[in-house]
């Protein structure tokens, strides 16, 4: 096993984590800019996105190079292919954070419609899912990854609550529509961020267990089919 | 594996070079008309195991088999002392690492196995020689010089001649012992293509130290270590997600 290859794999993991922390910061700042009505922070968040995209491209190119030159097998192969997929999800999360920031800029042109209660809750859960999914990736902890999957329902439920609440605001007074729809969008973006975090968690399960658990129920995903877990 | 798909099965096979136990309790199913690869670090027993199939160990004293290798559908035990090793070698042929054509013409190399069986009629031999050389993807290159010495051929061609020779007796199983280690990449590629075609007609077991070769040509892979089978599975599982930690370490090049 080449020491050069070992180092390349180590660097790859670190770059994925670097991307992860950039994206976590983006979510954090986007929601902060909403709650504090801080347009400067929102603009900064948007301006940092090209750096996120650049790392996405860098990781992709590294992975393709490693596949071509090192002919990775087994666990190394799964590490490289999951890194590629996780990066795609992280980059999309970054884009969603930008979308939130853009809605914030629009919302800041009008008075705040209502106190934000559910949105920050959703953001906290979604951020936690991203952080723990990446933690699971680094520690190769498939139990943690599976636990992250369980949190998605809470975010979906909050999104539903937000939608219904804002719907009634819109029905009651049409002048609320402009702000209410933008807040609904933000809720939807957070719900999508949580979905991307579950994708990352599913990829970690594949990395560790060699099993693809996308598109199956939690019960089906724990069936071993005679495989020995490492 | 259901019996219809089985060509051979090693059952509690042990092998001793004198006092040294080289194979320990081997249990392995060989599927009919598939390529099974044996991989593992030097000294793991893969060649020793391969050579049980055609009783090569009988050529030397103090070698001893215990257990069985059952050949289907007859269900005879290949390594049983009551079975004639020469009969076995008529039905289970081997191709070696270094091409070893006989010092004869191309034609006579392929015809030899049939002559030994008492087949001497020219038209029968002509047909058999052509068929084998075609199966070995060598016919077009040699059809106009069948009388030429085999040593006139390149390394890759000589190896394909050895494959044709092995095929001439219509073997039940074809054994390959590192068949391309001595060949350049182009010749290697031709032999690998050939192996993938031949499996439609004959069951193949291949020993290789080249993991990528096992990945390219085989349907099933057995990883051996210190005389034991550590893991056996479909090749794609072995190379994407092996179950055993030792297999994972070997496959990813962390030892061996």
Image (cartoon, coloured by chain):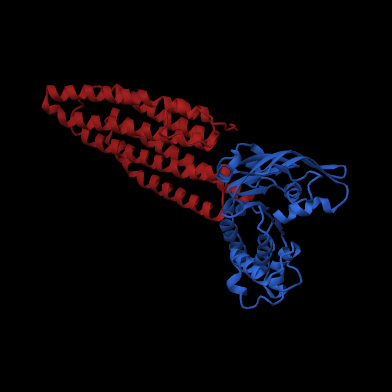
Chain colours: A red, B blue
Q: Is residue B47 above or below residue A108?
A: below
The image quarter containing residue B124 is bottom right
Say if residue A80 shows up in the picture.
Answer: yes
Q: Between residue B36 and residue A15, name the one nearer to us.
A: B36
Residue B5, percent from left and from top = 59, 43
The image quarter containing residue A106 is top left
Q: Is residue B149 above or below residue A99?
A: below
Residue A105, percent from left and from top = 24, 36
Determine the residue positioned at 53% across, 37% down: A210
Say if residue B183 shows up in the picture.
Answer: no
Q: Between residue A153 and residue B109, name the one nearer to us.
A: B109
Determine the residue positioned at 74% across, 64% down: B118
Residue A188, percent from left and from top = 28, 31
Residue A175, percent from left and from top = 12, 28
Determine the residue positioned at 19% across, 24% down: A167
Seen in the image, is A223 located left or right of residue A98?
Answer: right
> If the image is split into quadrants, where does the C terminus of chain A sit?
top right
The image quarter containing residue A226 is top right
């Amino acid at each position: 096993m080449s020491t050069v290859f070992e180092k390349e794999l180590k660097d790859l993991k670190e770059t994925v984590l670097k991307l992860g922390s950039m994206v976590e910061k983006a979510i954090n700042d986007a929601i902060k800019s909403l709650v504090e009505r801080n347009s400067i922070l929102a603009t900064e968040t948007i301006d940092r996105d090209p750096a996120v995209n650049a790392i996405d491209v860098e990781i992709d190119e590294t992975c393709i190079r490693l596949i071509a030159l090192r002919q990775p097998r087994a666990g190394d192969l799964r590490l490289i292919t999951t890194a590629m997929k996780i990066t795609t999800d992280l980059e999309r999360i970054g884009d969603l954070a930008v979308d939130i920031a853009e809605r914030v800029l629009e919302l800041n042109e009008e008075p705040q419609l209502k106190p934000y209660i559910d949105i920050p809750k959703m953001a906290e859960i979604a951020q936690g899912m991203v952080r723990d999914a990446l933690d699971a990736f680094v520690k190769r902890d498939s139990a943690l990854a599976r636990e992250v999957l369980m949190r998605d329902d809470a975010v979906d439920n909050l999104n539903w609550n937000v939608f219904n609440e804002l719907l009634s605001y819109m029905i009651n007074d049409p002048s609320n529509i402009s702000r209410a729809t933008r807040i609904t969008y933000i809720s939807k973006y957070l719900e999508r961020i949580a979905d991307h975090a579950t994708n990352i968690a599913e990829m970690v399960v594949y990395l560790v267990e060699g099993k693809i658990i996308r598109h199956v129920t939690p019960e089906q995903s724990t069936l071993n089919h005679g495989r020995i877990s490492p | 594996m259901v019996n219809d798909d089985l060509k051979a099965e090693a059952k509690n096979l042990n092998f001793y070079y004198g006092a040294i136990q080289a194979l320990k309790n081997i249990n392995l199913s060989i599927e009919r008309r598939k390529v099974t690869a044996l991989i593992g670090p030097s000294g793991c027993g893969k060649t020793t195991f391969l050579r049980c199939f055609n009783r090569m160990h009988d050529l030397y004293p103090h070698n001893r088999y215990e257990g069985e290798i059952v050949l289907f559908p007859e269900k005879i035990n290949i390594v049983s002392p009551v079975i004639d090793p020469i009969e076995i070698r008529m039905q289970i042929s081997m191709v070696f690492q270094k091409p070893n054509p006989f010092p004869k013409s191309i034609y006579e190399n392929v015809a030899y196995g049939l002559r030994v069986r008492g087949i001497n009629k020219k038209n029968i031999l002509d047909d058999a020689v052509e068929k084998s050389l075609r199966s070995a993807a060598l016919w077009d290159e040699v059809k106009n010089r069948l009388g030429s010495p085999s040593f006139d051929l390149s390394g890759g061609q000589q190896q394909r001649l050895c494959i044709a020779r092995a095929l001439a007796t219509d073997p039940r199983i074809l054994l390959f012992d590192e068949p391309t280690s001595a060949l350049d990449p182009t010749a290697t590629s031709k032999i690998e293509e050939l192996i993938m075609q031949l499996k439609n007609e004959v069951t193949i077991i291949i020993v290789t130290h080249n993991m990528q070769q096992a990945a390219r040509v085989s349907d099933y892979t057995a990883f051996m270590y210190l005389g034991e089978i550590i893991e056996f599975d479909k090749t794609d599982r072995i190379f994407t997600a092996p179950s055993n930690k030792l297999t994972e370490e070997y496959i990813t090049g962390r030892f061996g």
